[in-house]
Amino acid sequence: MIHHIRNKIYHVEVLPPKQDSEKLEKDLEIFSNKYLRVMDSGYCACVTDNAMGLLSFQGTEIIEELDLPVIPEQVMIHLNTFHTKDDLDNILNLCKTKGIMYLLIITGDGSERLPKLHPSDVGATDVESVTSVELLKYINREYPDTFVLGVAFNPYEPEEHELEKMERKIKAGATFIITQPLIERNEIVDRLLEKYPGIPVIVEAWMSRKLHLLSEAVGYEIPENTEFDPISTLKMLHKLYPGCGVYLSLLGFKTQYDLIKDTWV
Amino acid sequence: MKIVVCIKQVPATNDAKIDPETKRIIREGMKAILNPFDTYAVEEGVQLRDKFGGEVIALSMGPPKAEASLREAISVGVDRAILLSDRAFGGSDTWATSYVLAKAIEKIGDVDLVICGKQAIDGDTAQVGPGIAAHLDWLQATYVMAVEEISSSSIRVKRMHEDGYDICEMSLPAVITVVKDINIPRVPSLKGRLASNKCEIPVWKPDDINADTSKIGLNGSPTRVVKIQPPPPRHTSTKKIEGSSIECAQTLLRELKLRSIV
């Protein structure tokens, strides 16, 4: 992952079509175009896993079905704990077969339609529910030396709790960290960087102007009239966190994509 | 084994509007979904087919757009689907609806098992499954939470009730209605969803199933809705818990335990 930061490789979020899409073929075409554009740019396409609990198709099945090329350094799949054991193994086996090596392991947002992994599914005996920690341990045990596993860090949660969780994630085998969206310097992220100087950290840049969604993501209310320019904020994050990579969430492929190539200097 | 799963397309929200004249739901302009309870029926049908072989067929009565729910059933593994759609079916109550479904099941022929969700979220009657069994003169078990054993001639099920559960054994053919404890419905795969978009779904009309027209639609519906009114509002109250975070958590836990919530 450090290679991504050194080579200024952006992590570009690509959202898969939703399960209830009424124009699935069109949505798949849009996904495919975005994915291929990220590949062509040399960036890393990061495919989400039922983000915000919204039922969507899996990144791996779309890559398989559409026969999209996988450049191992340029694809990251998000994987959360809301799957059946069979689905989990299918996703991991497909990742292995396709050469997808970067996985972002998150506990995830559930919904009524999403089954949650049981501790027994991942061989966990000392917990009542499966979190990213148990999932990390399972993947490292069942697929040794196959994947590069990352985890999420939320600086908007109580710091002590979040850092303690991070310690367990690192012990379970996480080798890189992606933060929740930052729109300014964050002291908790600064302390995370101090605590883990050897672990690559990627800060998330919020590229949408929809501040109500950002409020949902960060868990506190950002007034709608806040002046917010995503590209300027992105440039600022590069200055504030020069040793970090950047994850671009909700990037506008029509209006913003061509602008980002000049932002990481 | 030939299994028929009866499904219904229902309004997506609980804010359904009621026509003051007919007392029926105004379906125009509302987003529609597969009745959530029916997803368990579909999943059970697919699991039984996978285990014992045979065929699982989804059956629905409704307007042409109900085809979308049948496609959803196909996307999770149902082999084929049939839509019962005609103006003459409009206005059917649960008795007329179960008659139409029973006639379609007769036409499909050689059906071993009919599976329904325990009820639809729009009407909440839980009458259609038992109605089908009555029209077909088949045995039935409602509120089934597990299919324990099944052979070519009989089925043993575990059914829920307020005081526990019963184990029932019935000869086949039979009708069961299922509750959500029975399985975890799968989410459609992309491959399944794309395949379901290409499937032909036949539409059957009254003549196709030899339906007696006096038994369908409003004419065949003995139910009359005389009044509809919203339920009384629930009485809720808010209690503020004060103290340190640990004290608050302890108080909250105590309160939840007192109410048997945890």
Image: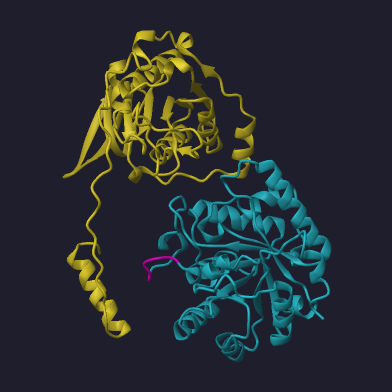
Q: Residue at x 76, y 77 (%)?
A: A3
In the rendered image, residue A127 lying in the magenta stretch gets the answer yes
In the rendered image, residue B204 lying in the magenta stretch gets the answer no
Q: Position of residue A14 (x, y in %)?
A: 68, 59
For chain A, the rendered hue is cyan
Q: Is residue A219 left or right of residue B240?
A: right
The answer to whether residue A70 of the structure is visible from this angle is yes
Nearer the observer, B239 or B194: B239
The answer to whether residue A65 of the structure is visible from this angle is no
Q: Is residue B224 left or right of residue A30?
A: left
Q: Position of residue B45 (x, y in %)?
A: 43, 33
Q: Quadrant of residue A49?
A: bottom right
Q: Quadrant of residue B196?
A: top right
Q: Main secondary structure of the magenta part?
A: loop
Q: Position of residue A250 (x, y in %)?
A: 66, 63
Q: Residue at x 57, y 46 (%)?
A: A19
Residue A30, compared with residue B29, is above or below; it is below
Q: Residue at x 56, y 20 (%)?
A: B202
Residue A14, compared with residue B161, is above or below; it is below
- In the image, which lettered chain appears yellow? B
Q: How many marks?
A: 0
In the rendered structure, which segment of residues is drawn in magenta?
A126-130
Nearer the observer, B73 or A215: A215
Q: Position of residue A221 (x, y in %)?
A: 50, 73
